[in-house]
Image (tube, grey):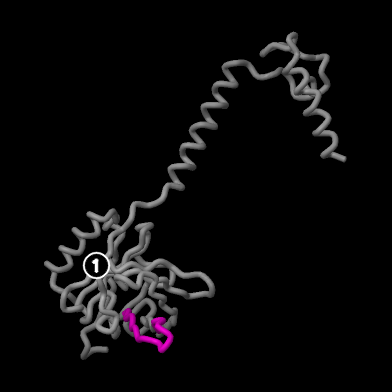
Amino acid sequence: MPHSIFNAMGDQNNQALLSPNAGYGQNVSGNPAAAAFGRLPTPRLVVRVRHAVLITVVALLAGCQTPQPMPTVPTVDIERFMGDWYVIANIPTFVEKGAHNAVETYSMNTDGTIATRFTFRQDGFDGELKEYNPKGFVRDRTSNAVWGMQFIWPFKAEYRIIYLTEDYSQTVIGRSKRDYVWVMARTPSIPEEDYAMILELLTRVGYDVGQLQMVPQQPEAER
């Protein structure tokens, strides 16, 4: 019943708007719908509403723009990339906040997917041990630098290898959204000059490096 009432009111209001005697700003007391809602909008109000709608649409379109492509390294030797990687710094996901001694370990499955073991201590070096086991899927077989990382089926998070040293000792994993990033190495620490160079790279590709956080790592002997 309410739906029928609004339809009837809408039809009557449309007739009033189309009538040559129903100008903007006039009191259309002869129209039940207009009487219910008061005076019809003035030209100035219509312009303001249109302006507000235009601003809203532009803002929504800006928010929906496709991020600029993020280049990856030309090629990755998957076999060499396997093994342990210490997380040196990151823009953490909610899971990683407070992580200490974070280590990502990769190994090849027989079907070509990548078994992943991510471990860390929560909120301290003696904190609770956490472990997650997502599965990696190589999406770009030409470069092997673009993966999908699946935590929950069927969703795969983007994983792009955007930096990798020739000796496979340091790497950076990014995302086109520039929301998360991981700086990783084969050792629990890297030289300051290497880290500074990585910060420059991340700035060039569009990251806000002010969000980057160092991940506390103990020396091997203290673990």
Left-right relation of 169 to 123: left
As drawn, the residue found furthest toward the bottom would be: 221
As drawn, the residue found furthest toward the right would be: 1
Q: Amino acid at mark 1?
A: Pro
Specify whether residue 221 is painted magenta.
no
Residue in view at x 51 percent, y 36 percent = 56
Q: Which quadrant holds the C terminus?
A: bottom left
Specify whether residue 108 is painted magenta.
yes
> On the image, numbered disc 1 is attached to which residue?
74
Left-right relation of 17 to 9: left
| Residue in front for this viewpoint, 132 or 101 | 132
Quarter occupied by residue 45: top right
Vertical arrangement, residue 34 with respect to residue 112, above or below: above
What x and y, as percent, mark residue 199?
A: 21, 61
What x and y, as percent, mark residue 27?
A: 74, 12
Residue in view at x 41 percent, y 76 percent = 137
Left-right relation of 109 to 9: left
Residue in view at x 33 percent, y 67 percent = 160
What x and y, as percent, mark residue 111?
A: 43, 85
Residue in view at x 15 percent, y 63 percent = 197
As drawn, the residue found furthest toward the front would be: 142
Q: Is residue 28 visible?
A: yes
| Residue in front for this viewpoint, 132 or 63 | 63
Magenta region: 102-115
